[in-house]
Image: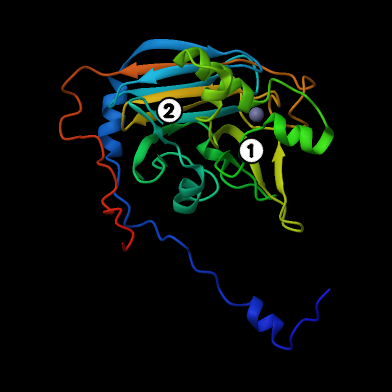
Amino acid sequence: MTTAPSDADARRAVAPVICYPNSSLPKPDMALFQRVLGAATVVDTRFAAPRDACTFEVPAGGFFRITSVEGPQVGDLNLWNAHDLTERFYSGKTRALHGTHVTTGERLWSSFPHLRPLATIVQDSLEWYGIDEFGGSVHDVIGTRCDPYTGNLLAGSQYHHCCHSNLTRALAAHLGVSAQEAESHVHDVLNVFMCTGFTRDTGQYFMKSSPVRPDDSLTFFAEVPILGALSACPGGDCSSEHSSDEAACYPLKVEVLVAEAGNLQGWSSPPKNGYDQSHGL
Ligand SMILES: [Zn+2]
């Protein structure tokens, strides 16, 4: 242990500043999205089976809705630009811009050099949850995705139904490529319905039983053409453990919704980020 300096309390008492004040972010037209969603119809329905994943495609200007159907279940979501898989969801930057958990009106941002919204959350039936007394909240961008490598590192296991592998298999089947090729596209997720936080005493990532119940849903507006993959996490509601077949696990439903052409007048897909990429050279 180090010895605290005489002004330790004063140093600790300095007020924090927000790293990325987000008031200057472009504002989504939520009223327009809500209005168009009200007139949209379901054009495709997929199910992520327990401990497995499904893929889905959404045209720019469409919506997708993830719904709990049979029991409390957490989902791990990956998103790509359907026309360019190198542009994909950037969990870390989304966290830096919006915070550890996301809800209605917040956006899922894409990787460099694009850094634009891939999707905007337009409806969240768990928005009421807020932040609980443990510092926990729902739909996090702090976890990565459960994976067989960490399980092997910690416990020497060979488990094949972590979200990382589920997403890999689903993407491989969708693209018609090998597991190894698909795996290179899998990235850190949005943990849909997952309730998580950091312990105040040790700063460790924690999870707790998700408050999600059947019929709860999270709905997104697709800002670009989207290829998505959703895994029904082997952790189930994540109340005890993941990376095994121990937890009760349920399917998740994904619906793709599209409105009539013309309803989105005034909206256009966000452009790629404006930085010139010269990097001072
Ligand atoms: Zn998982």
Quarter where residue 6 is shown: bottom right
Q: Position of residue 171 (x, y in %)?
A: 50, 19
Q: Is residue 43 left or right of residue 96?
A: left
Which quadrant: the C terminus?
Answer: bottom left
State which quadrant residue 145 falls in: top right
Q: Which mark is residue 195?
A: 1
Residue at horizontal 53%, vertical 39%?
Answer: 128
Horizontal side, residue 84 vs residue 180: left or right: left
Q: Is residue 200 left or right of residue 122?
A: right
Q: Residue at x 64, y 32 (%)?
A: 211
Label 2 with label 1: CB-CB less than 8 Å = no
For the point 65% across and 50% down, the residue is 135
Of 67 and 142, nearer the camera is 142
Q: Quadrant of residue 258?
A: top left
Q: Nearer the viewer, residue 127 or 46?
A: 46
For residue 84, the mark is none
Task: Give the total of numbered labels.
Answer: 2
Q: Residue at x 70, y 81 (%)?
A: 9
SS class, disc 2: strand
Q: Residues within 10 Å of mark 1 (few under 14, many from 20)?
A: many
Q: Amino acid at mark 2?
A: Thr
Split into quadrants, the picture shows ligand 1 in the one at: top right
Report which residue position mark 2 lands on.
219
Q: Secondary structure at mark 1?
A: strand
Label 2 Cα neighbours within 10 Å, binned few <14 / some 14-19 / many ≥20? many
Q: Earlier in the sequence, mark 2 or mark 1?
A: 1
Q: CA distance from mark 2 to mark 1?
A: 18 Å
- Quadrant where the N terminus is found in the figure: bottom right
> Which is more toward the observer, 7 or 110?
110
Q: The disc labelled 1 sits on which kind of residue?
A: Cys
* Vertical order, 107 against 171 (above or below): below
